[in-house]
Amino acid sequence: MILPDRISLSPDICHGKPVVKHTRVLISNILSELATGASHENIIANYPNITEEDIRAALEFSSERANFESMTYEAAV
């Protein structure tokens, strides 16, 4: 399980948002960088205290969250 190994959730760190464990690097920041085309190497350069494994954990964590979230969409007006 990735949550205790690589991802941390604490109300005292970044308002309880998921971060890479022992950092304040938000999982959402990693995902945003990936979405804009940043390579893993670029992300690690921007956040030198994370690893390739942390990036994979962020993706896995987000994938698992997406499976449990239900979304509603309203038709565009």
Image: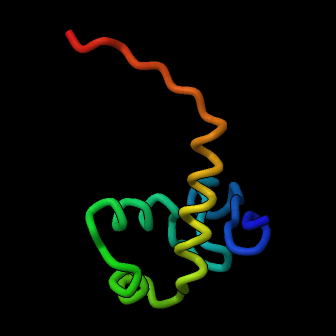
Q: Image height check: is 57 above or below 69?
A: below
Q: Nearer the viewer, residue 27 or 41?
A: 41
Image height of 68 relative to 50, above or below? above
Residue 67 percent location from the top left of the image? 63, 40
The part of the image, by quadrant, that contains residue 22 is: bottom right
Which percent across, then down, holds residue 71? 51, 26
Hey, which residue is sitting farthest left in the picture?
77
Q: Nearer the viewer, residue 41 or 26?
A: 41
In percent of width and height, residue 43 lies at: 38, 80
* Quarter occupied by residue 77: top left
Q: Is residue 68 left or right of residue 27?
A: right
Quadrant of the image containing the N terminus:
bottom right
Left or right of residue 25: residue 5: right
Residue at screen point 60% across, 34% down = 69
Q: Quadrant of residue 37?
A: bottom left
Tell me the residue at 69%/73% (across/down): 6
Q: Position of residue 68 (x, y in %)?
A: 66, 37
Left or right, 74 with reference to 9: left
Rendered residue at 68%/61% (across/down): 12
69 sits to left or right of 77: right
- Total numbered badges shown on the rendered structure: 0
Colour mapping used in the image: rainbow
